[in-house]
Image (spheres, grey):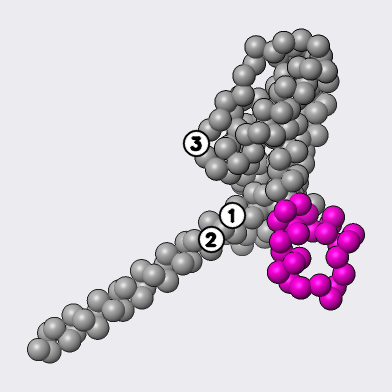
Amino acid sequence: MAIYEKYTAWNEGQSLFDTTLRGLWFFAKLAFKLLIYFPLVFTGYIIATKFLDKQSSGILWITIILLIAYAVYLFIYFLKGVILVLKFHRNLLWISLFLIAVSFTCILPVWFMWDTIENTISKLGGNITAQWIFALAFGTYIYFRYNFLTNIAPSSVFPAYDAGIHFTAMILRRTSTLRATKSKEVI
């Protein structure tokens, strides 16, 4: 009987540990995604401050910020469609739009994290080279989340992406042989 009680107590402790570890992993992934989509959320916050006051409900604030962030996310993929069609038709305007999109989505989060990266690497005994390598790797990871020069979009923003392709083809008065491709990812 004593062995069974010890096993049960150990099993309950292990279960609690596993659940806690899964919860921490979930929140770590959520924080990382928030960091990746920081420019969208921050833009949502800036816009929300223009028409919400400090006395508004916290739920209202979060809802409005997320809705605006999603609208900006839709616009980014609309812009991606525009960039791809302009590039496909060799219109050099795509380069400036590409630089704007990459600066907003990829460079801004790295800039936001620069001090944290610097402090962490210096405490670990690293040098400035390690800091730059980590920052470039993080920026590259974010870039490949958007894949600005690849004809693919997540299903949650596919209509905006497809609209960007069709809108630009209409403006250029050309039929674009470029067809939008939907990925299996939601975001």
Magenta includes 57?
yes
- Residue 174, percent across and down? 76, 10
Residue named by callout 3: 184
For the residues labelled 1 and 3, say whether their Cβ atoms are less than 8 Å apart. Answer: no
Residue named by callout 2: 28
Residue named by callout 1: 32
Please state which of the two labelled residues, at mark 3 or mark 2, is closer to the viewer.
3
- Residue 22, percent across and down? 42, 64
Q: Where on the picture, by quarter, is residue 48?
A: bottom right
Q: Where on the picture, by quarter, is residue 14?
A: bottom left
- Could you tell me if residue 89 is visible in this image? yes
Q: Which residue is located at x 73 percent, y 27 percent?
A: 164
Q: Residue furthest right?
A: 50
Spatial CA span between label 2 and label 1: 6 Å
For the residues labelled 2 and 1, say whether their Cβ atoms are less than 8 Å apart. Answer: yes
Spatial CA span between label 1 and label 3: 21 Å
Q: Residue furthest left?
A: 1
Which portion, as a residue range, is magenta?
44-68
